[in-house]
Image (cartoon, grey):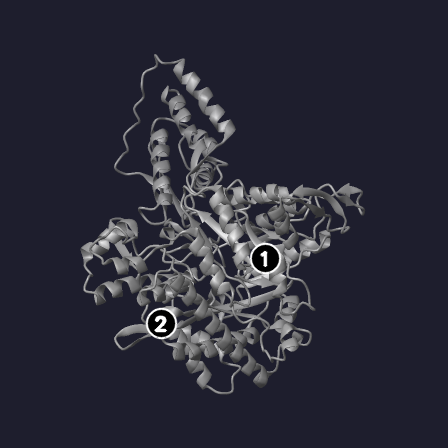
Amino acid sequence: MKITANARTVLERRYLAKVDGQVVETPEDMVRRVAKNIASIETDPQWEERFFEIMTNLEFLPNSPTLMNAGRALQQLSACFVLPIEDSMEGIFETLKNTALIQKSGGGTGFSFSRLRPKSDVVRSTGGVASGPISFLKTFNAATDAIKQGGTRRGANMGILRVDHPDILEFITCKSDNTEITNFNISVGLTEEFMQAVESDSTYPLINPRTGEPTGELRAREVFNMIVEGAWKNGEPGIVFLDRINRANPTPHIGEIEATNPCGEQPLLPNESCNLGSINLAKMLKQADGKWVIDWDRLEEVIAIAVRFLDNVIEMNNYPIPEIERMTKANRKIGLGVMGFADLLMRLGVPYDSEEGVELGRTLMRFIKEKSHAASSRLAEERGCFPNYKGSIFEAQGVPMRNATVTTIAPTGTISIIAGCSSGIEPIFALAFTRNVLDNDRLVEVNSMFEQILKDEGLYSEELIEKVAQTGSVQELTEIPEHLRRAMVTAHEITPEWHIRMQAAFQEYTDNAVSKTVNFPNEATREDIETVYRLAYELGCKGVTVYRAGSREGEVLTVGHKKAETEAAAEHVTAETTSPKHNPRKRPKVTRGQTVRMKTGCGTLYVTINEDEHGICEVFTTIGKAGGCAAAFSEANARLISLALRSGVEPSQIVRQLRGIRCPHPMWQDGQQILSCPDAIAQVLDDYVKNGLHHSVPADNPGVRQAAAASSDSAARDVSDPCPDCGAPMVQESGCATCVDCGFSRCS
């Protein structure tokens, strides 16, 4: 397999089999394991070789659970699940139990909370009042934190509430604080009635789901503006067009679609799952008459093999609960999509943000839908139609089908790193960027298609790559011809309107939905986001996710009581201005201590506590890679703690200041919740003190109060969103945050 060094790192870290922590599988071994397992239901052994070939060539890759689990003990191969939440305590917690089973096996879950009665509604069995859907949304969020204790990849969730639910205003604002409900994406389920009311600036009714009766009304445009405000602030909530999704429901006689998977591209019935896979369009090119063109024949061949592969996955899957197995096998939905689309455009010299680019996307997806449906139809003749075929839209059309849905445009954050191509149908995020791999080692990561084009054009040089890596863009580099620069646009150089037009072009020929992020610059206005939402509705999209650059990063949170403590301490120090300044004692050459490993939302944190003859004298911390924000803040905290300790500050005072500081991604370890890196340091320091492993130092000098006052300044914290595994920046693509450094994804 011709994979990049970064792809190999991701595979070794997340996909390849290990024994006692040591990798015992090569990338080729992994592909052979998957091909052999998925082809085991075939009578013709050639299918294993065909599956092996398209994966080894990086022409097609299935979703991560299939790569990780096929042929291994877990054998859970699906990425997407939707579970029902019934309006009863028994139903709610039955779903919570099933959620735990799914997330334990590596799947992502979607829910509609729309069936739950609103807050303060009557509960006849107890004579009390209901707490409402948002309270249970928070319960599910907390459970996700606990399901995989000690891990860094918690389950991903989607929470949806209909816009006509009486608690919709509380839902829209429930994630306005970036530290709340961190394990969920949320989307408002919009109806045609609501959108028409927005257009006419009229009211629409709120419906109690318990009774089906109206409980009031809201002005649609005001609610719409609240949704836009939330999306502008931090990208939450997104929107899905429920009526449009159900018009495309292939089995309306079986039920209504209420929710999607975590990234929104897979609308599913309750208790339904789906397995996905993506074709690498960057590999679907050939040269003809001295120019690059799409290899339509090879694309058709790969489509047919991939459809059969995904249909086999349904049979080979080990389903977490029997209800999901029954529903999945009754409808046999698969989701064949693409990646590498931006690479293909760049090689063809077609700008992403152009009529030609959008039309090419539409043409490609039309071809993929036609050929994949034909492949599913042939499978139906060989193996039979999906069991719920009778009464489906395909029976009405007189077309035999093995699968109720065939195509999906999914996020491909991690598998596109393995394939060495651009993600999904997203534009390229950066043509080149710098990664810090060791303490003093920099590695410039270059988009492989961009690099090859430069070499073909005789433009490649190390100096040029270094210049590109400074910004990720070539638009200001006049040494690159204008026609090449025009075709090498990156995500933030494309206006939001072109993002949504491309999404709509692919949606036109996609059975399920399209996962895509509409990128906005930081200075974008609320009106800009409103324009895109309206355009998405007009052009036929099934949902929209937006992200304004920097909107989830750099927010400063001030904890009120700590601020008050700081001010009080500062007043006390001011009253003693005549006290002499205190210099910390010097660090001896030799110290003794211990190192403790802690799981945090920023990755694995190693905390070392050392003593000298006077007591605890220093704290060292290590996390992620040098050069990352997590490593920098961790080192800064440790240095200040060490300075305070050698100035005579009691460790208990430091513990008091750090304990309880919360970041957006708390973790669990050994039954104990770790709220942040500072909280982890506090826990280690506290345990060290309580175990009697240090010598207490009398705090009888003025430096104690000064250091204590200074340490309270940690109450004001920067809440950015680095990769929790390696500390590198996360990229917001396809409705999902993914680390381009190590492959960590917040979506399963």
Neighbour tally class for label 1: few under 14, some 14-19, many 20 plus, Cα within 10 Å: many
Q: Residue at x 22, y 57 (%)?
A: 480
Q: Is residue 509 above or below residue 535?
A: below
At numbered mark 2, what does the secondary structure look like: helix, strand or loop? helix
The mark found on residue 110 in the picture is: 1
Q: State the quadrant of the N terminus.
A: bottom left
The mark lying in front, picked from 1 and 2, is 2
Residue 128 relative to residue 282: left or right: right
The mark found on residue 297 in the picture is: none
The mark found on residue 283 in the picture is: 2
Res 600 seen here: no
Residue 650 relative to residue 462: left or right: right
The image quarter in which residue 318 lies? bottom right
Q: Position of residue 577 (x, y in %)?
A: 36, 14
Q: Are marks 1 and 2 in contact (CB under 8 Å)?
A: no
The three-letter code of the residue at mark 2 reads Lys
